[in-house]
Image: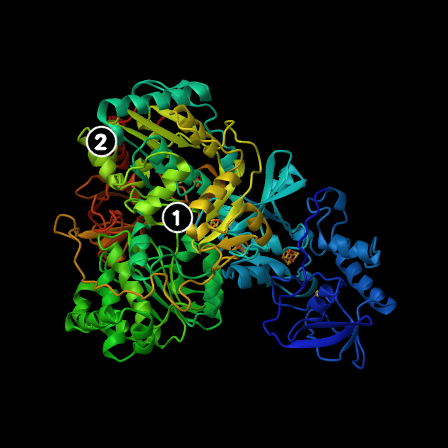
């Protein structure tokens, strides 16, 4: 059997660096002050039996199994709750101690069924271990488990079971939910032998506040909380350490496998991004990888109205290459292009852009990051000098003030949210800037110091008002800004921002945020002393997305909040490899490492390495590709891992553009919406089926390791390689590590990255080069990457998308915890138990005047299109603003969003759409009409959604 090696030291590490020397079992041991005796003994190689202690949780001291003897002290103190002192002499093993511990274990065993051989935890149960360690085979206390018997198992959660019979009431689950996850969903009810674990108000787990993160399951020392997959499949036989394929937190996970089947995903305690925690998606929602809907054979067809024809890889790839060459011959080399995926590995992304530039001879390559974080790249590059976040996640533990702008971490970045909540419970102040009352505003033991509930589209007015407070109230850190930034741009900016038009009082009418609240927030941020800004798509997906990113950087520079731990500007990236896909040269104007294609020296480097002449003009961005398709000059597109039709704004426009092309190639796991318009379908490989790396929101490069063979026979990088060869361009790699070697040779910020180093260090935050061989957790220390920080003037310009009498409400969009992006993966898991449709949140005032009550079907209409959803009447919304998600193709929310976009990067303005919402008496008729309209454009050969 595969042995789980958690190397659990019993209690967390002490924060102190002061050494303390004591004697344990006759040997001197030196540990930091504040260390428990249990941990000191474990570090010295002596394992003291324990049940209620684990090194991810504060010591609790309830089980009394870890008793020790201390010279000069009466009794038998618990080693988990007793801290070391200098000169202390401890005995951890004596016949008296063993006798006492045996008594404790016998008591537990008396209350616990003794059917270990059939228990799913057999072999990794800590009670079983303790009994074996102490030679306990039965119990003198003969309750036979009677006190815990009689409660029905709670199997309501789709992923795990709670069996009270197996519970030893150690409260590790309760503490994990409180301390690690921060949800506070569990309590211990009752007293003594009658006590038991209870979720929320004595509810089934599924109906309780539990968010199914699995921290309690991970902490449970017995089988009381066990994964259903483990019960069904039995114990795993091996484990592979890999990186979550969902969000940009990039949690390190251990895929525990039996034969070729993943039994469970366990958060890796050594994972630097997550430290042994995960969320419901990474921890449990991996079943999509083996779902029956996976496409296992390549398919081609002449027209999108034809049925698909299954073919072999050779034919599919040969056909694609021939089509692309035919189109280029007829319409010119720039009539084709490719899209890289933020869900694929760095190596795969690098290969797709290489294929487009080197094999197809055009710079028409773009990435799905275009529609999410492209303003981050542009804004941070211009102000600070690097297109990435400045901090490691752990930096938040040193922040005194945290500002969350346009992000909803508890849903979008749950494991980072847990860490953030821990810091907030320790006393850091929180400012939230969001139109909606996100969970963080008020959650157990946390209350935001200020919630700036702004009107969608007015971010820049708010950030300017905050900066105005800082500058006009004398709160700027002039010494820092004058020394570290361009003095002329700093002074210009100060004069600009001090103007009365940016004051909270003047902007209140625009933003809807009371001036006094903005002043309070500005003062809190400036006072710090360590103030950190975290932001999401609520910043970038606006017509002024780039301006807002620059405004954030301005504020951080002016207050000296960059270049050390606890501060910084941190974009929370949505998909697992958004950072990586941008780093790898996916944008039409940049090679890897954000170097412009017109730079002769850089281009020369790539030309020499790739043995081909490269174009010096930037290629087309995604929206330009669509425009060019409609005007007839762009005819072929290779799309790896991106569902435009569901994820991009103004669906009708996207469909028209795709329908106008002659060869659309979709490479994906499933027949996604975009595949309706494809001529070639190439089956993709999930993150479990390949080797590679992902780069998370902290610039952390982590290994993705192959757990099973690709379901369709080829990993995505192999497909791209074969396509290049079919196009006549030689591309040969035996393993993705060779691709990384090439990336490192050609990219200064990746110069020192190798798979060997990644295996050795666990992960690396770029830049990693001669100056920083082990990577760079905090950027801009001492100097900004661009030298001096540059201030930009950030004039607020109202979006043209504004409410009117016809469309009086503003729609903004976001995510929920249980679904991911366009839902392709999570809709194929049991996460549907929590969220099985997109819903429209609407304020009670707006609902009442439209006659809408909770659960009603409502029609949502904008100038782009309409859709029908079920309503949730909610005070999370501010009057005049409605909110929904875009996880389900049935709701087709992006039919409603417009093609407005960011002035610098064309990132769509998803966050502001003027709409009207009406109660729909006959939703079936609405749905039927909308379905008919859509299917008129859809290929009849595809199954209906
Ligand atoms: S799964 Fe997570 S949220 Fe739910 S009870 Fe366990 S620790 Fe709490
Ligand atoms: S469910 Fe597990 S972790 Fe929770 S109290 Fe019972 S034995 Fe301990
Ligand atoms: S927080 Fe993100 S990376 Fe971590 S397990 Fe959840 S989805 Fe995966
Ligand atoms: S492990 Fe120390 S009291 Fe339980």
Q: Residue at x 42, y 37 (%)?
A: 351
The residue that mark 2 highlights is 629
Q: Residue at x 49, y 36 (%)?
A: 686
- The image position of residue 856, as x and y in percent, is 29, 45
Residue 407 % position (x, y):
36, 57
Residue 849: x %, y % from top left: 20, 53
Is the residue marked by circle 2 packed among few (<14), some (14-19), or many (20+) residues within 10 Å? many
Vertical comparison of 512 with 70: above or below: above
Residue corresponding to mark 1: 583
Q: Residue at x 25, y 61 (%)?
A: 459
C-alpha distance separating marks 1 and 2: 27 Å
**First in sequence: mark 1 or mark 2?**
1
The picture places residue 838, in percent across and down from the top left corner, at 34, 44
Mark drawn on residue 886: none
The front one of 60 and 362 is 362
Disc 2 on helix, strand or loop?
Answer: helix
In the drawing, does residue 874 fall left or right of residue 214?
A: left
Q: Is residue 417 visible?
A: yes
Q: Quadrant of residue 845?
A: bottom left
**Looking at the picture, does residue 735 appear above or below residue 456?**
above
Determine if the C-beta at disc 1 is less than 8 A from ligand 3. no
Side of 936 relative to 394 (left or right): left
How many neighbours does mark 1 have within 10 angstroms: few (below 14), some (14-19), or many (20 or more)?
A: many
Which residue lies most toward the right here?
95
Q: Residue furthest bottom?
A: 72
Q: Quadrant of the C terminus?
A: top left
Residue 832 makes an appearance in the image? no
Q: Residue at x 28, y 51 (%)?
A: 541
Asked whether the residues under the numbered discs 1 and 2 touch, taking CB atoms below 8 Å apart as contact, a structural biologist would say no
Quarter holding the N terminus is: top right
Depth check, mark 1 against mark 2: the one in front is 1
Helix, strand or loop at mark 1: helix
């Amino acid at each position: 059997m595969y042995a789980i090696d958690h190397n659990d030291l019993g209690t967390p590490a002490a924060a102190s660096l002061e050494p303390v020397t004591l004697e344990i079992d006759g040997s001197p041991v030196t540990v930091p002050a504040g260390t428990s005796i249990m941990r000191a003994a474990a570090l010295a190689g002596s394992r003291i039996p324990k049940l209620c202690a684990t090194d991810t949780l504060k010591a609790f001291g309830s089980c009394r199994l870890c008793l020790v003897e201390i010279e000069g002290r009466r009794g038998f103190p618990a080693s988990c709750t007793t801290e070391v002192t200098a000169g202390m002499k401890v005995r951890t093993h004596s016949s008296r101690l063993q006798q006492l511990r045996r008594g404790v274990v016998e008591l537990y065993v008396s209350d616990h069924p003794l059917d270990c051989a059939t228990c799913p935890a057999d072999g990794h149960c800590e009670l079983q271990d303790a009994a074996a360690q102490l030679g306990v085979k039965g119990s003198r206390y003969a309750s036979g488990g009677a006190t815990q018997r009689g409660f029905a198992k709670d199997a309501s959660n789709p992923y795990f079971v709670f069996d009270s019979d197996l519970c030893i009431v150690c409260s590790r689950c309760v503490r994990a939910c409180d301390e690690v996850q921060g949800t506070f969903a569990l309590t211990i009810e009752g007293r003594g032998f009658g006590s038991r674990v209870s979720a929320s108000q004595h509810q089934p787990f599924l109906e309780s506040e539990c968010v199914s993160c699995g921290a309690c399951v991970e902490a449970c020392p017995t089988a009381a909380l066990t994964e259903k997959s483990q019960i069904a499949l039995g114990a795993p036989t091996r484990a592979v350490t890999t990186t979550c394929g969902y969000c940009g937190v990039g949690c390190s996970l251990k895929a525990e496998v039996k034969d070729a089947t993943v039994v469970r995903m366990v958060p890796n305690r050594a994972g630097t991004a997550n430290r042994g925690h995960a969320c419901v998606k990474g921890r449990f929602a991996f079943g999509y990888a083996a779902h029956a809907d996976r496409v296992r054979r390549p398919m081609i067809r002449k027209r999108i109205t034809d049925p698909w024809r299954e073919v072999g890889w050779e034919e599919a790839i040969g056909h694609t290459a021939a089509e692309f060459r035919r189109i280029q011959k007829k319409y010119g080399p720039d009539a084709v292009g490719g899209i890289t995926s933020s869900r694929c590995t760095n190596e795969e992304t690098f290969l797709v852009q290489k294929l487009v530039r080197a094999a197809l001879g055009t710079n028409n390559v773009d990435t799905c990051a275009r529609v999410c974080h492209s303003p981050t790249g542009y804004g941070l590059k211009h102000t600070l000098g690097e297109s990435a976040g400045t901090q490691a996640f752990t930096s938040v533990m040193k922040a005194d003030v945290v500002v969350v702008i346009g992000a909803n971490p508890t849903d979008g970045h749950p494991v980072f949210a847990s860490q953030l909540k821990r810091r907030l419970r320790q006393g850091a102040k929180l400012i939230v800037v969001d139109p909606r009352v996100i969970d963080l505003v008020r959650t157990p033991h946390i209350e935001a110091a200020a919630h700036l509930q702004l009107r969608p589209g007015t971010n820049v007015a708010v950030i300017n008002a905050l900066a105005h407070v800082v500058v006009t109230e004398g709160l700027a850190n002039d010494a820092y800004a004058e020394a570290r930034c361009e003095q002329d741009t700093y002074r210009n900016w100060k004069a600009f921002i001090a103007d009365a038009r940016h004051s909270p009082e003047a902007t209140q009418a625009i933003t809807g945020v009371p001036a006094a609240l903005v002043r309070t927030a500005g003062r809190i941020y400036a006072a710090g002393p360590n103030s950190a800004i975290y932001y999401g798509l609520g910043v970038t997906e606006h017509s002024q997305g780039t301006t807002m990113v620059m405004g954030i950087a301005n504020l951080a520079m002016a207050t000296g909040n960059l270049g050390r731990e606890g501060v910084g500007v941190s974009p929370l990236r949505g998909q697992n490899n958004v950072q990586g896909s941008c780093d790898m040269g996916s944008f039409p104007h940049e090679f890897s490492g954000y170097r412009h294609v017109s730079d002769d020296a850089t281009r020369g480097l790539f030309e020499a390495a790739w043995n081909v002449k490269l174009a010096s003009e930037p290629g087309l961005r995604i929206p330009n590709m669509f425009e060019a398709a409609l005007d007839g000059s762009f005819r072929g597109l290779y799309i790896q891992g991106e569902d435009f039709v569901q994820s991009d704004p103004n669906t009708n426009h996207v469909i028209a553009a795709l329908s106008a092309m002659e060869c659309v190639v979709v490479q994906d796991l499933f027949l996604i919406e975009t595949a309706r318009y494809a001529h070639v379908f190439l089956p993709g490989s999930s993150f479990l089926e390949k080797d590679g790396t992902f780069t998370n929101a902290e610039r952390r490069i982590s290994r993705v390791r192959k757990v099973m063979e690709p379901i369709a026979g080829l990993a995505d990088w192999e497909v791209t390689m074969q396509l290049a060869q079919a196009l006549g361009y030689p591309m040969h790699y035996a393993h993705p590590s060779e691709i990384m070697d090439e990336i490192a040779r050609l990219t200064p910020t990746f110069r020192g990255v190798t798979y060997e180093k990644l295996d050795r260090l666990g992960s690396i935050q770029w830049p990693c080069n001669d100056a920083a061989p082990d990577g760079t957790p905090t950027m801009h220390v001492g100097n900004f990457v661009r030298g001096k920080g540059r201030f930009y003037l950030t004039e607020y310009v109202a979006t043209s998308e504004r409410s009117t009498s016809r469309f009086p409400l503003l729609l903004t969009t976001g995510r929920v915890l249980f679904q991911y992006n366009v839902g392709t993966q999570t809709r194929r898991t049991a996460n549907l138990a929590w969220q099985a449709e997109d819903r429209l949140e609407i304020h009670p005032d707006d609902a009442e005047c439209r006659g809408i009550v909770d659960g009603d079907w409502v029609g949502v209409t904008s100038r782009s299109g309409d859709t029908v959803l079920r309503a949730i009447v909610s005070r999370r919304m501010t009057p005049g603003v409605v909110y929904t998600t875009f996880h389900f193709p049935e709701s087709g929310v992006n039919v409603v969003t417009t093609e407005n976009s960011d002035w610098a990067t064309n990132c769509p303005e998803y966050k502001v759409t003027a709409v009207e919402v009406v109660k729909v008496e006959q939703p079936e008729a609405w749905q039927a009409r909308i379905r008919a309209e859509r299917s008129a454009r859809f290929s009849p050969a595809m199954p209906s959604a």
